[in-house]
Amino acid sequence: MQRSPATAPTIARLIEAFHRLPGIGPKSAQRLAYHVLRAPRAEAEALSEALLEVKDSTRLCAACQNITDADPCAICLDSDRSASTICVVEEPLDVAAIERSGVYRGRYHVLHGAISPMDGIGPEDLKVGELLARLGDASIDEVILAMNPNLEGEATAGYLSRVIGAMGVRVTRIAHGLPVGADVEYADERTLRAAMTHRVEVEQPNGDD
Amino acid sequence: MHLTRVQLSNFRSWAELSLDLVPGVSLVSGANAAGKSNLVEAIYLLAALRSTRAQTEGEMIRWSAPQPQIMRVAGTALSEGEPTEVEVAVAARDGAAGGSARQRSGAPLTSKRIRVNGVARRAADALGAIRAVQFTTLDIELLTGSSALRRRFLDVAVGQLTPSHAAALSRYQRALTQRNALLKRIAEGSARESELDQWDDLLSAAAAPIWEARSAAAHALSPQVEQQHLALRAPNDPAETIALIYVPANEPGLRESRRRDLARGSTSAGPHRDELLIDLDGRPAANFASRAQQRAAALSLRLAEADYLRSQAGDPPVVLLDDIFSELDPPRRERTAAAVSAMEQVILTSADPAAAPFARSELAASWQIDDGRMRAAQG
Ligand SMILES: [Zn+2]
């Protein structure tokens, strides 16, 4: 981004910081920076505190790997939820989206990404080991794969269904109600509800290797 | 279908050009480098939605265009009385205009916008809105050039009829890139071989619709190429048969070629390795045919492509002939003219109007380009 000599360096630095955020173009970054500049000091303090707090006091839930303030997280602690079903998602925002749909009453597991060799991301770079460790517990009787409907999501689901299927645990995938390109995080509640309700059994590859 | 209007703005040599077009044969004459080929490229862009000549899209923007540098090509076509308007605009970022600066990975130096009837569309959804076939002197490369050019010949024909083909190709390409990246990671020891399983499945599934579409197109094109080739033949020509043979690279399967793929670090089978063989009298045209024979074969391929689009879409495509007549012998000029005259609209350029095998009375319109200006030629 180009620096104009007319912009004070401190403001330029803030504009650049906003510009680095996902989905923020140069114009929006400028608008945000000048908004902060004109806002009361208390508002700027609240913003900077919230930014630091999220870095300092959140961690990953040791069980589901979702981002949480308290470990284990509220969902893992909730005894009204079924502990025998795990819904596997790519990102924390996917948990929020499925929760909004209100259709699912089991536990989650957040992978923090999807398999993508061109980006150097393999199963070891995701929270796959943690998932397999949870499945060692005999009380899990279904794993629902809710990856995004794109190549990398499909590759991740394909990999997990092989590994988990080999452990003798039932694997299902959310129905292909999600149109290609419509990530879980952006899917509307009705679509997600339908996709979760009409999930399909994953065929286990039987010795074709 | 036929175009009724084409408008260019800051497209290569053209600052502004607005042209009303009519069905039938139109001739555009002018000296070399007068802007004839640029006009044909612009019109074909409305159908293919990407340039057949430019290395980077920034090249299409007139270098002296005012800031912000944007080139725009718009055209309206009538198909069975229904108008369709397509607009392609390319905007430069950071002085990319006119240059051939390579795009850095992931960061295009230009952005392209496509609209159909005023509504923004992705290229894959806008293909086929206007259908066209372009004949150029470079078509001989269909015979002599790499197999990628022949695959593209099939893909462009299929894409104008089946827009989902473009999406299938890009899905396959991405799966291929991922599998190749994984092969390298396995070779480096940073990934396990078992991780190939799901990419093999995804790549095979992505390949299937491409093989099906290409095979169907080659099957339909093959007799049309033979027929066109026969029609172009002069009575005293040696008996020359042409054959179009599509060879999908689907053997062995990905599982079977895994050892070899791991060793070479890339995927050895799949649609990216398909071949379209072109034989003249049972021998590869690239090696055993004369220049004139290759030129005639290339012409047959383009004429077959036009026929194929017409028969599949039920409506003839716009035919663009970019200065191809000067290198044909007079009998082949006449036969080519007869073949394309059956189409609804033909736009041809020529540096030498005498080489164009149409009498003045056969022309629906005639223009002359002088000093970057287009004017109606004197009758
Ligand atoms: Zn948890």
Image: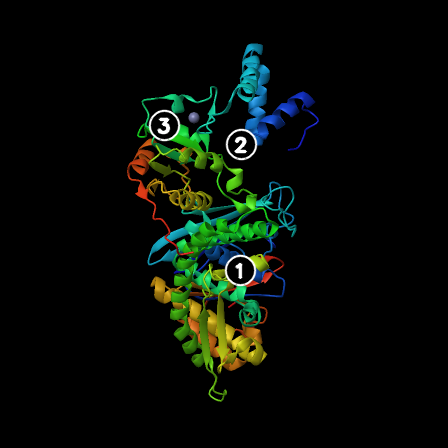
Protein chain holding label 1: B
Q: Where is mark 2, residue-wise?
A: A22
Protein chain holding label 3: A
**Image x and y of residue A164, in percent:** 40, 42
Tag 3: residue type? Glu
Residue B119 visible in the displayed image: no
Q: Earlier in the sequence, mark 3 or mark 2?
A: 2
- Specify the label residue B259 is tagged with: 1
For the N terminus of chain B, the image quarter is: bottom left
Q: Residue at x 62, y 48 (%)?
A: B103
Tag 1: residue type? Arg
Residue B206 visible in the displayed image: yes
Q: Where is mark 3, residue-wise?
A: A99
Protein chain holding label 2: A
- Separation of disc 2 and disc 1 at Cα? 41 Å
Q: Residues within 10 Å of mark 3 (few under 14, many from 20)?
A: some
Q: Is residue A34 above or below residue B149?
A: above
**Frontmost residue, B214 versus B178:** B178
